[in-house]
Each structure stands twice: as structure tokens, then as C-alpha cells.
Amino acid sequence: MDLAPYLLLALLEGMVQASVLMLTALGLSLVFGVMRVVNVAHGQFFMLGAVGAWLCAQAIPGPPAIGFAVALIAAPLAVGAIAWAADRAILRRIGYDPEGTIVSTIGLLYILQQSALIGFGPDARAVDPPFSHTLRTPWFGYSSYKLFIVAVAIALVAALWLILRRTRLGLIMRATQFDRETAQNFGIRVDRVYSAVFAVGAMLAAAGGVLVVPNQQAHYLMGTDPLLLSFVVVIVGGLGSLPGTIAAAVLIGLSDGLLSVFFSPTLAAIASTLLVALVLIFRPQGLFGRAAA
Amino acid sequence: MAEVTLLTTRGLCRDFDGLRAVDDVDFTLETGEIHAIIGPNGAGKSTFVSLLSGRLRPTAGRVIFDGRDVTRLPAHARVRLGIAYTFQITNIYTSMSVAENIALAAQSRLSPGLFGRGGVGPRITEATQAAARAVGLTERLNARAGDLAYGHQRLLEIAMGLALSPRLLILDEPTQGLSDAEIAGVTEVVRQLASRATILLIEHNMDVVMALARRITVLDRGAILAQGTPEEIVADPAVQAAYLGDGA
Amino acid sequence: MRSANPRLLLLCAAVVAALFALQFVLSEYLVLTATRILILAIFAMGYNMLMGYTGMLSLGHAMFFAAGVYAAGLSSYYWGLSLPLAFVLGVGASFAVSLVTGLLVLRTQAVAFMIVTLMFAQVTYLTTLQFSDITGGDQGLTLPTGARGFTLMGIAVDLTRDSHRYNLALALFTATLAGLFALTQGRRGRLFAAVRENAGRTEMLGFNTFRIRLVAFVVSGTLSGMSGALYALMFGYIGSAFAGFELSIEALLFTLVGGPGTLLGPLLGTGVMTLLIDRLSGVTSAYLIVVGALLIAVNQWAPAGLLGTLRDRRLPWLK
């Protein structure tokens, strides 16, 4: 048997998987890094992005590309607004207590998920890809849309990187992450930074959801797997470390793609979850991160 | 003199991120004495006693307590052997009553396990009251520990150490933040304790040190600078230069 | 010997007596609901031992419940084990699972502890799906009706009869309540409270805090598993949902609502929430939205729960 076509397919699928994962996990990592809280509702923002893409596709007539383009901007903005509101209404009021935040975001998880069930219904729904060009390889045809996902994800991450490193906003975020008290003393409105970071984190997940939906249908329960995989990535990459998160997303996405070709996805999920739990127990600073001070 | 030695350290070192906080300390503590450790801020006093109590692990060297090498024993096991430690920063159970705070210490000695023997309740109560009496907190046994005045919290901290009936009581700056009257009280309490336990005292207040200590060890930059009776220490030119001189 | 907390002991006795009397008043359907509440209350009480009394918030207690469900259910289904033996096996399995898990996860604390317990539970859940040939997966397995009765020490118990089920559940609930009373009140209870409030200080008083945590963890996991074994055998069904995230969250919610760190809080929380969820799920399939809203509300406004708030305001002995 010739392995080459399988490997190529696994590699391509892995890259697509890794790009979406990178966006979602970066959102989680950013929130953890700056705010020191774990957002268990993060996967629901991903789901809302996907549902938003479907809504846009339904509401906007004409070629699918237009609806998709609108969705890519509107859905993350809407989700960001929801996250902003949730931060003000819930997280700020409990003072970002780490354990309380987890309990509250579990509550938020249920509220968002069940609201989607009420509004969107229990069925999975497909969205047409904005274009349906097929790339030819010697063995199989491959949707060029999937490669488009990779490109958009890389562009978004590059944009995030520039914002964090080159802009005043990024400087404020990093200052808050580094030392909350001092940032406050320098006149930074830490509460606003937190709301903004929470919103940006959610928007990244939502963008991932929009990108994924022409490839994989929208469903109200689709937020669970991205959440768990993002946990895996963020923990392996070192809690709160953005370069670590990116590296880990590529690693996990690729290996997950490879494993899923050869093993059952459930088995792959069992192995990776168990592995990561053990990482957290025995090497809490992650595989790539440095030892915590 | 071997039979009166309670604790010794041999070549004790502790590094933090490459910085040596405790540097090759050979130290001997005799049974029944009040021994004070003094030194400028950052001299490694707290780190040194943390190595004795087991809150920190040494980078190198050994700790021998009562002829037994305890270097690798965890803190709770050392407490069981009789090394008690009272915290520099008040560390009590604020939501519990004063009596419960002390009773936990007494319980550690009288009924250590979760499934320990029954019938020790009265003895725990008795030990609790005795420790409270020794520091003058009998009136406040039912108060919530978090509601106590700061000076009383310091006394509670000492009472908890006392209720453990330790052989060695390490007091980490017991008079820090107290008024003169309160300091006099604590000094008297410590003097009383000395008949029951060996006391290792970290203290900044030189009046307290001079009033209590039979011997003094001066630490500077993690190493022993001088050791001797209070009179010898005061007369030591190296100590005057390094500590008393520029400190005062 | 004097009781550690006589007023609470009296209240517990009154509650058990009232629960016994309840079966003569309630309709058949409500007796069934009450049976479920009692069994799930054991789960919540186990959860409370760890979360309320010892201060460690687990997000994965469904794994212990599932250990009880599957060990008891599968041994009855495949090997035809008698119900008491299957029950004992279920309890034993959850004891073993919680001991091994505890030795691992107790190296972490706070947020890391929550995430690690969540992940272990997820692994358990996925495992029940992966081996669906054996476990029945999502669909689950229904235990044969022939294996629904047993005779123990001369007492014939028929698990298809409501009153038998109710009294059996009540007996085990009472035993759990008594066991936890002994563990959480007085001198022992003080130790768990000490670890919860200030572990560092407790270590320096000479207590092995890891061991105290481990005891709390294993007691907690084993009680959860006992509840699972009972649930599976009593209602004759096992399925992956018993290992799911939602069940872990229910244990948390029941405890939070009733009052973490109070002996009777989990019973109250389980009762209130089960009745509420039953009522709601008749109205909408999205009943979990209320679970979500309650989690946020309780966490924000009443983190001490119903009985905890009562304890803090009026009745300090209610713990």
C-alpha cells in the first residue's frame, strides 16, 4: 500500500485543524495570560461564530462569498459584544476570583449553548463555502477553501501579533499582564483592559467558528471539542505564553490530523487529554514555557 | 558537651535562582538555651530557620536534631519530632475561635491522626486552656481569631507553638509591630517558656535580644559572622562594622 | 462520650424520621422522585466532603459516579452477579479509582485542580464511548429484569417495587449521613476545616495535609461511586451520560445551592434542584439554561448557599 496519499491528506487536514485551533486557543491563552482566569465558556464563542456565519448566509442573498465576507466581520463583532457584556455583568462583579470565574463561566456556557438551542434549533446546518474551487493532487482533489482557512488564520494571528507588539493597545495589555497594580498606578483603566481582552479572546474563537462552518456544519453542541483542544494547546504551550500556544496548536493540530487518519478520533482524544492532564500535574509550566517564578 | 546539643547544622546552603541565601552554615544549638539570631535585612535569617523547620529544602548540607538527621523530613514530620515554628507574618485560622486555633495545635500532639484514639477530648481542652493561660488569652478563648487585635494575634501565634509542647520553639520576629507594653509582655512570656523548651529567636529589637538571649548568632549575607554571649557580640568589631555600625 | 454537635445530630435524626414518614404521604410518582433525590443526595454529599469541607473544587466527580455505575452495572449485566455483590464491587471500584486519581491530582491545587479533574472525567467519558461494544455507549444498557431482586440476611428486596427502593435508598442515605457526621464534626472536622482555611499553617502544626486531603478525596469519590452503583442497580440502566460533564456540574450545583460545608445542604440542594429541573424539562428541552443562570447567580450573590447563609446569619452549629 502506498502511504504517500494518506500522509499528504493527513498533513493537509492537520494544517486546517491547526489553523482553527490556533485562533481558538490564542483567544483562551490571551484571556488567561492577561486576566489570569480560565474561561470555560470559550468554546461557546466558537459555536456562536459558526451559528453567526449560518445566520449571515441565510439573511444575505446573492453568491455565498458575500454572506461569508459579512459573517467574517459581523459574527466576531457580535460575539465580542456578548463577551464584553458578560465580563461586565458577571466576571467583574466577582472580582475575577479564579475559582468563581470557572463556576460562572460554566454557567455562561450553559446559557449560551441553550440559547443557541432555543434560537437555532437542535439540527446541524451547513453553509456553502464562499468558493468551491478544487485543487488537484495526483491522488485526490482537495478543496481550496480549506487552504483559504489556513491563510486567513495566519493573517489574523499576524494581525494580533502586530497589535500586541506594535500598538499602544498592545502595550497596555502587556503592562496589565505583567503587573496589574503598577498598570493601575500608571493610570491604565484595568477594568476596561479586562473587558477588551475578554472580548478579543471571544472574537478570535468566533472567527475560528466562522471559518470552520463551510467545512463542518454548525451545531449548538459544537463548542465542546474546541474548548477541550484549546485547553490541551494552552497547557502544552505554557499557560499564557502566546508563542508557545501557536507552536502547540500547530503540533497538536497536525498530530490530531495524523492520528485521526490512522486511529479513531475518540482514541486520539483520550490519549491527548490524558497526556495533557499529566503535563499539568507533573510540569505545570507547560512543555515549552519556562518555570514559573 | 555532646549530650546537651539539641540541634546542629553542617554546611547548610540554600540557593534561590543562583543567589546563595544561606551559605555553608555550621550551627549548634544547646538544650535549654535561648538563642537569638540577628543580622541585617536580607541576611538570610528567615531562610535559615525555614531550613530548620522544613518549610524549605536545603541546596546542600545537613540538619541534625537530637542526634537524628532530619534533612529530608517534611515539615510536618519535624513538628512531630518537636520542632515548632511560629510565623513572622501572623498566620492563624481567622474564621475559627481562639480556642479552636490552639486546640488544633494541642490535637496535633495528643491525637495526631484523622482516625486517632478517642477520649482525648478533655486533655485537648486542658492543654488549650493551659497554653492560653501562659500567654494571657484566657479571657478571649471564644473570640473569633480574625477579630483579635494585632498584639493578641501575635500572642495566639505563640500559644499555638506552645500547645505543641515542642522541644525547640522557633520564634520568627515575635515582637514585630507591637507596642512597647506589648513587647514587654511577649518578652516575659518567652522567658517563662524557656523553662520548658529550647528557644531560637529571630529578632530585630536589640533590647529584647539582650534581655533574653544567652547566646547570639550574627548572620550576614547568608553566613555566620560571629557567635557568642551578648557581651561578646556587642564587643565584636566585625559585628559593629557590618551590622551595629551601619545599621544604627 | 458527648456528641460533637448535639443540635445538628438532633436535626439530622429529625430529617431522617421525616424522610421515613414521607413515603406514607407522597404519591407513587413522588416517592420515585424522592428515591432519586436521596441517591443523588449521596453523590452531592460526597462532593461536599471535598468541596465544602476541604475546600477543593472538583469538576470531574462524574468519573467516580461512573466508576460505581459501570462496575456494578456491567458485573450484573455480563456476569450475573447478585445485586449486593455488584453493589460492593461498584463501591470498591470507585474507591480504587478515587485513590489512584487522588494520588495524582492532589499534586495540583485551585484552578489546576479543577482543570485536571475535568480532564480525567473527560477521559472516563470518552472511554465509555470508545468501548461502546461493552458499555453500550450513549445508548446504554438495560439490566435484565430477572436480576432486580435479592435476599440479604433473610430480607427479600424487590427493586421493581417503589417502597423497597425508597427504603433501601433511605437506609444508605442515613448511613452516609451518620458517617459524614462522624467525619466532619468535632475534632476530625476541625482538621478538614484547617486544611481548607490555611493549609500552610496546618502543615506547620504537624499535620500531613496531603494525607488529610487524600482521605477527603477518597471518601468523596467512594461516596459518589456508591451513589452511582445504587442508581444503576436500582433503576436498571447504565449509559455514558453518567460519566458526562453535566453530571459533574450537577454535583457542584446541588452543593452550591444547598450550602457547601453544611451536612444537610446537599440534600436540600439536590431536592430543590431535582424538582426544579424535572418541572422545567417538561416545559423546554433547554432547561439547562436555568442551571447556567443559577450557577452564576449563586456564585455571585449567595456563595454560602441556602443552609450556609442560614449558618452565617443565625445558626453557627449548622455545619
Image (cartoon, coloured by chain):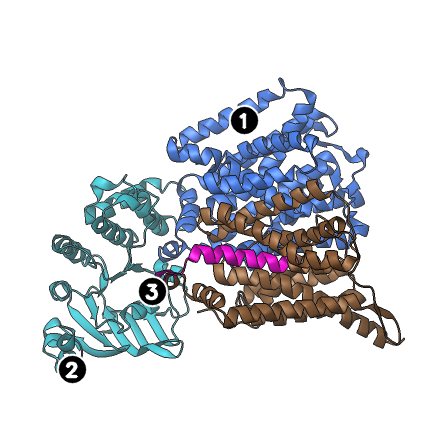
Chain colours: A brown, B cyan, C blue
Number of dots carrying numbers? 3
Disc 1: which residue = C16
Verify whether residue B41 appears in magenta: no
* Cα gap from disc 2 to disc 1, whole angstroms: 75 Å
Q: Amino acid at mark 1?
A: Val
Which residue is denoted by mark 3 in the rendering?
Answer: B53
Main SS of the magenta part reads helix
- Choose mark 3 or mark 2, whichever is in front: 2
A22 to A220, vertically: above or below: below
Give the amino acid type for the residue marked by disc 2 in the picture.
Ala
Return the mark for residue B238: 2
For the residues marked 3 and 2, what is the alpha-carbon distance in whole angstroms?
Answer: 29 Å
Residues at marks 3 and 1, common chain? no
- Whole-percent x and y of residue B11? 33, 79
Residue A227 in view: no
Q: State the residue in front, C314 or C148.
A: C314
Q: Classify 10 Å Cα crowding around label 3: few (below 14), some (14-19), many (20 and above).
A: many
Question: In this picture, which residue range is highlighted in magenta?
Answer: A184-206
